Amino acid sequence: MTAPPTASLAGGLARDPVLLIAARIGLATGLLGARLTRHLGIQRVLVVTGTAVTAGFAALTQLPMADGSHLPLAAVTLVGFGTAGMAFGSMVTASAGIADRDQGLVGGVINTSRQLGAAMGAALLPTVAGAVDRTRHTSTAVGDRAAMLAALPAAVLATLVALMAWYRAPRHGVT
């Protein structure tokens, strides 16, 4: 008997409630992106979501947490909300004003850059954690804290770029 192709994903999500919650937050952010954009404007959405990512990584630099603390879950939720919102906002911003015939190219370039960034982060952050933690365990709080501290400047930079774009945007009804 063979397992369905989604069995390992479902099993992983069932065993890792933090991943499941982060996935739900990311999905909700994607689904609510248009509504948020209508109310706040795309520039503000980018600022809000960039701030969420920054706050999440800043909280994760405080590892280890006291037993029973919900701060890691809240921090991962902020990172999930923020990264999904930044992805949505960057796609909307990049494709605004682009001819229909060029939308596929723009989408491909944005998605490629996001995937390269994710791959680099997935390679670099465990390397940072391992370099700091020399106990040869797969992960410790000291290494994880260092990895989150290494990710924090990228989140701050993304938020600053969004803030600068918001402040420089013309104020004729579009924010």
Image (cartoon, grey):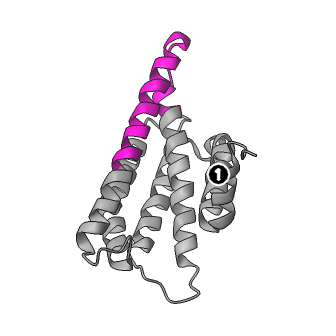
Main SS class of the magenta portion in the image: helix
Q: Residues within 10 Å of mark 1 (few under 14, many from 20)?
A: few
**Where is 113 relative to 156, above or below?**
above
The vertical placement of 21 against 172, above or below, is: below
Query: For this rendering, which residue is in front, 116 or 11?
Result: 11
Residue 56 vs residue 3, the one in the foreground: 3
Q: Position of residue 59 (x, y in %)?
A: 44, 73
Residue at position x 49%, y 46% in the image: 86
Relative to 146, say whether 23 is above or below.
above
From this viewpoint, which residue is outermost toward the top? 101
- Horizontally, residue 12 falls left or right of residue 171, namely right
| Left or right relative to 126: residue 56 | right
Q: Residue at x 48, y 33 (%)?
A: 93
Find numbered disc 1 in the image and state the secondary structure of the residue it sits on: helix
The answer to whether one can see residue 35 in this image is no
In x, y percent, where is residue 117? 37, 43
Q: Note whether 9 is above or below 18 in the view shown.
A: above
> Dividing the picture into quarters, in which one does residue 6 lie?
top right
Q: Residues in magenta?
A: 92-120
Q: Amino acid at mark 1?
A: Leu
Residue 23, image x, y percentages? 62, 54
> Which residue in the structure is indicated by mark 1?
9
Residue 144: image x %, image y %?
Answer: 37, 71
Residue farthest toward the front in the current orientation of the protein = 1
Residue 49 in view, yes or no: yes
Q: Nearer the viewer, residue 33 or 41?
A: 33
Residue 126 vs residue 95, the one in the foreground = 126
- The image quadrant that residue 30 belongs to is top right
Q: Is residue 135 magenta?
A: no
